[in-house]
Amino acid sequence: MLIHFCEESLKELNLYILLESRIGLFFKLYLQSDMALTKTYHCPRCNNTKLIVYDDSFDCPICMLEFEKKDFDIFEDDEILAVEEKIKVVRALMDDD
Ligand SMILES: [Zn+2]
């Protein structure tokens, strides 16, 4: 009787572990699909995806440049200017006057 009880609880434990891992997997898949929906950004210069992301912009730690997220909706990769480059352009224009 005791052995039978142990077997039963072992089965229950196995079922519990199986269920737990299933829930974990579902949760992982849910998180992954959620992340896929969130637009992922990449550095337009080196294609690096390990970026320091802010609300409106992100930094590429390899190129040491900051890019604005909104530029990605308007321009192609090779047309995107880093914040630092925009400042240079503005300064160059101002110096012309
Ligand atoms: Zn980069």
Image: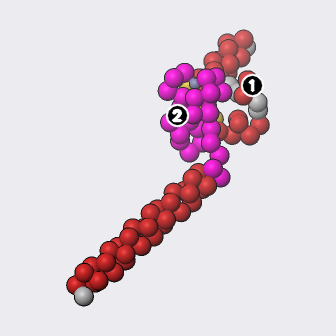
Q: Position of residue 45 (x, y in %)?
A: 64, 23
Residue at 48% x, 66% y is 23
Dividing the picture into quadrants, the one containing residue 3 is bottom left
Residue at 31% x, 78% y is 7
Q: Real-space Cα distance between discs 1 and 2?
A: 21 Å
Residue at 54% x, 28% y is 60
Query: Chief secondary structure of the magenta span?
Result: loop
> Residue reaching furthest bottom?
1
Residue at 49% x, 27% y is 61
Q: Nearer the viewer, residue 11 or 96?
A: 11
Is the Cβ of the residue at disc 1 closer than 8 Å to that at disc 2?
A: no
Q: Which residues are the magenta region?
A: 36-63
Amino acid type at image mark 2: Lys
Q: Nearer the viewer, residue 11 or 57?
A: 11
Q: Is residue 92 above or below residue 50?
A: above
Dividing the picture into quadrants, the one containing residue 1 is bottom left
Badge number at residue 50: 2
Label 1, on which residue? 79
Query: In the drawing, does residue 26 fall left or right of residue 9?
Result: right
Q: Is residue 2 above or below residue 50?
A: below
Label count reads 2
Q: Position of residue 77 (x, y in %)?
A: 72, 28
